[in-house]
Amino acid sequence: MQKHSVVNEERLPEEEELEKDILRPLEQPASKKFWLTCGFLAAVFLFALIAWTNQLINGLKVTGLNAPVFWGVYIVNFVFFIGISHAGTLISSILRIANVEWRRPFTRMAEAVTVFSLPFGALCPIVDMGRPDRVFNVIKHPHLTSPILWDVICISTYLTTSCIYFYLSLIPDIALCRDRLKNVSPFKKWLYRTLSLGWTGTEKQWKILDTVLTVMSVMLFVIVVSVHTNVSFVFAVTYKPGWHTTILPPFFVLGAIFSGIATVIVVMAAIRKYYGLDRWVTDYHFDRIAAFLLALTCFWFYAMFVEHLLTIYLGEPAEMSIILARFFGRFSLMFWVMFSLCFIVPLIVLSVKKWRTIPNLVIVSILINIGMWLERYVIIVPSGINTLLPWGTAKYIPSWVEIAITAGWFSGFILLLMLFSRFFPSITVWEVKEGLHQAAQKTQPVLVSSTAKENA
Amino acid sequence: METKGKFDILRRKLIALFGTLTAALGVFSLRRKLASQENKETEPAPENHESQNGHKPRWGMVIDLDKCTGCGACVVACSVENNMMLGDAQLAEQGRVIRWMYLLPMIEGEYPNIRSRIMPMLCQHCDRPPCVFVCPVSATYKNPEGLVAQIYPRCIGCRYCVNNCPYTIKYFNWGDPEFPQPIPKGFNPDVAVRYKGIVEKCTFCHHRLQIAREKAKAEGREFRPEDYVPACVEACPAKAIYFGDLNDPESEVSKLAHSRRAFRLLEELGTQPKVIYLTEG
């Protein structure tokens, strides 16, 4: 990470405008439409809670699950939510370590996506459990060979670490809110005062923050890979055809980053449009992240190709029954829609420069996310339906309870993001400032020698 | 500097807190260790479950498909013995009826040259049970005599074991079982009635083993493997099911298990099932 010279140097003229632009949404009262949307999302979430209560009272018979399809939409949601949470860490930690310039305006919302999607992801297996009241048995009677225990360890570590990381990088911006926002409600004033932890932006404080964030970035990089690897282990270690493959862990990590980046693009485009931040999240930034998404699309196809080629080449009957169900059988519609949404459409739209506009990018990102949800579905459900021993008729149609809870979890996630954008700056102000300073340094000939030294 | 002072105080407080926690943990674990040692001194020696020839039994089953008539008596006996849910057409259609033992129809070949057969299917009590490896709470485990068991009060209902069972022979309670009025009066008192949200499976009628051991003890004689007969074995009118100690080379199951007709289901997976089938004719 670059040194924070922000303190010592004189303020650039852009800084003032940046602060003004980004703090504006926190000061202005939200529109009626905003609150109506929030209310609607909250209602959907509450309905999901009612549906869950119904499930708690009656048992899992209210779902569409049955023998032999023991895992369904809940586990699909689990993998999906944990998946999109990977974007935050990727952008804010890996791209931060690599000091990729275009990451700057995305970091805050990327981390927010991580922190807000993880709790919903972690809730999914609890919803899926027959006895959620016994969830702490996992800690009381841990069984070390179970991938579910590994998951519990990984995801709780990930949640804690990413929450701390998110909060730490928020502190300077909260302090900015505390100092600059005078016309806000007493609650907000109290919130900023408490959460800024007496941050004054001294050199020593910056140094501490810098060190901690750098160390945590490296830690998070390791954790993020371990999390989705372990999520895939839940499937990969079993005897189920279609699940038991060694490519699953890297494929899951890749898929997670893929759908995560797409989510960040959607969130950021919405924020930019709604709060008018075009100047700070520019077309250039979106162009860069679109190129990154295109690269991920190609990687995704590569993993998909390898997985299927190797299975088809050997043609082992149990494995082939899954492949046939995906390609031509009862899941063929879902599979080919998924394949088009995840590969064909993004490849065509993103590789033609003329079509790589922001509205197109947002549509592609939404399609990728739908595609990735379907991808998890065609990984999880067909393997449930095709048992090793003959089984009569197996079918799975999600019930209204499962659909309601899925809708509720998505609404809750969007609701948290919306509320967050009203309370805290949606762009990491200090990080963008840092970028501005670096850019200014590069253009000033006086400072060339010192920059050169830094680079050397 | 004021901030520095604050940080220093915070740091000292944190160190003190961690120190206290570590000390508390140390004291706690020491006390537990001491307590367990005390218990060891007072506890009676663990019961020796060795049979006469001095080896630990390894319970196994042999099903002779040549003798099996497919009458389904084993299925009924098992359901009655183990207080199984009744189920109805709707539940059966949804795939939610629980039968620890059922008849698996196997159809071989394509239409004109078709051949179908029926195999009584039950938990294979694997020696390398896949369900045990993946249970996050050790609710399913293999006991020293090779029986794979399920602890109902501990099971969290994640259904991971059911997913990993290649035989799909563990069952999940999707709802509470419903019994018409007179049935609960006739429940087998030796077997717990399961409830919603947990996984259950065939136990090889483990309660019968306990009863047989207690009976032998009360009668003041050695326990013989012949005393332990699961319900399905007892009920089979064709005497197609054999049960006994696979570790005893002289036992009938042991001999049959080594016969040329013997095979095990999905043997290639390496789960080492203890239910052995004898092929037809």
Image (spheres, coloured by chain):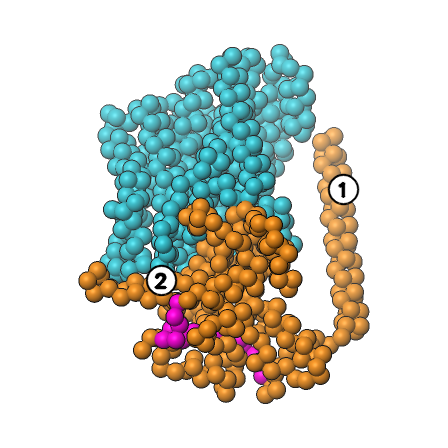
The reply, left or right, for residue A190 in relation to residue B118 is right
Q: Which of A214/A426 is in front?
A: A426
The residue range painted magenta reads B55-70
The correct choice, above or below, for B91 with respect to B101 in the image is above
Chain designation of label 2: B
Q: Is residue B58 one of those drawn in magenta?
A: yes
Residue B205 on image: x %, y %: 56, 68
> In the rendered image, which quarter is residue A368 located in?
top left
Q: What residue is disc 2 on?
A: B105
Residue sitting at 54 percent across and 46 percent down? B175
User: Where, by quadrant of the figure, is residue A4 drawn?
Assistant: top right
State yes or no: residue A157 in magenta: no
Callout count: 2
Report which colour depicts chain A. cyan
The residue closer to the viewer here, A424 or A403, is A403
Could you tell whether A403 is left or right of A39 in the image? left
Q: Earlier in the sequence, mark 2 or mark 1?
A: 1
Mark 1: amino acid: Lys
Give the left or right position of residue A386, taking residue A207 as reference. Answer: left
SS at circle 2? strand
Q: Say which residue appears at 35% left-offset and 79% top-offset.
A: B261
- Protein chain holding label 1: B
Q: Amino acid at mark 2?
A: Pro
Q: Is residue B267 above or below residue A25?
A: below
The reply to whether residue A215 is visible in this rendering is no
Distance from the alpha carbon under mark 2 to that under mark 1: 69 Å
Please name the residue that numbered disc 1 is placed on.
B13
Closest to the camera, between mark 2 and mark 1, is 2
